[in-house]
Image (cartoon, coloured by chain):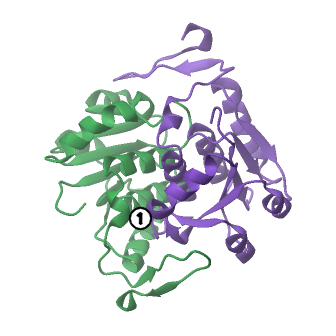
Chain colours: A green, B purple
Amino acid sequence: MDDEPEVAVLRLGHRPGRDDRMTTHVALTARAIGASRILLPGNASDAVATARSVTDRFGGPFVVEQDDSWRARLREWEGVVVHLTMYGEPVQTVEAAVRAAGRTTPVLVVVGAEKVPFDVYEHADWNVAVTNQPHSEVAGLAVFLDRLFEGRELDREWTDADQTVIPKATGKKVVPADEE
Amino acid sequence: MDDEPEVAVLRLGHRPGRDDRMTTHVALTARAIGASRILLPGNASDAVATARSVTDRFGGPFVVEQDDSWRARLREWEGVVVHLTMYGEPVQTVEAAVRAAGRTTPVLVVVGAEKVPFDVYEHADWNVAVTNQPHSEVAGLAVFLDRLFEGRELDREWTDADQTVIPKATGKKVVPADEE
């Protein structure tokens, strides 16, 4: 987040139709839980449009990129690479090391959809499991980012928003951002 | 989890087809991140089957129920009710209060799909936001549960599993549960 090296998320693989909502949720979760950028596959146009629209309305900074050259992005990433997978090392044992690295170097968090090619496991600096149980790449990403940022992302300020949600004990309150 | 009052998750609303994967991910996330039970709508048969199959293979205890009388379940719940919504109070300000309540009484976590009826907001003891940003009910549930349990769910032991994933720095290792 602010004043720190970037944390970006790379969504690997996308099956149009079947994965539209999952990829959209990956992108919106990346934005909401403190990443500054999402790299989406070229065929994930629905998710790209939704993530950009949410950023326009609710603020940024958050960059949505569409790019099919993920192998090159991984190889050329100037920082550390974390691959989230249920087969990896427990998040609770490696998060401190990732956090320490992230203080001085950008972090790329890789989130797979279909079967992830083995070279991703080999290229990653850490293969990280948010439990070694099958669940959801969206859930894994959310817990990983919340732990990486130690909750600081929840106090993030948003800029260039059109509208802002005001927390309420009961009901809904949304105001134009300049009336916040 | 073990030796504590129950934490259950209620999925509210489900559109067959469109919501199948999201509801499945809600159920698997509930299981993996420490809830002991999921209550799913009657028309969410795909998610019910997947959650039961994962529990059979990877262990429990985890109960999957199918039930359309969610208003009665909410009303008759003998414990506290938490409704996750982007309009609610910040998780970081209310989590300690929910955790304190959960030490002595069961917690029902309500996760909406379609537009949530207003009486749910009124009935909930807490309407809780994991950021006041739009993202994903799966991400919100995961972060909320991880914070509620303060990470203890990650060390949970599973019983009656057929297979177990052994954490690995690189690659995949899955063994029959009795060889763990």
Q: Nearer the viewer, residue B71 or A159?
A: B71
| Vertical position of residue A34 compared to residue A91: above or below | below
Q: Along the horizontal axis of the image, is A137 left or right of B115?
A: left
Q: Total of numbered circles in the picture?
A: 1
Q: Along the horizontal axis of the image, is B37 left or right of A95?
A: right
Residue type pointed to by label 1 = Val
Report in which chain the residue with disc 1 lies.
A
Q: Nearer the viewer, residue A64 or B156?
A: B156
| Vertical position of residue A2 compared to residue B37: above or below | below
Which image quarter is the C terminus of chain B in?
top right
Residue at (43, 81) in percent of width and height:
A164
Residue found at the very far bottom of the displayed protein = A179
Look at the image and tell me whether residue A17 can be seen.
no
Residue corresponding to mark 1: A48
Residue at (32, 29) in percent of width and height:
A119
Look at the image and tell me whether residue B136 can be seen.
yes
Residue at (15, 45) in percent of width and height:
A78
Residue found at the very far top of the displayed protein = B179
Which image quarter is the N terminus of chain B in?
top right
x, y percent for residue B81: 68, 59
x, y percent for residue A45: 44, 63
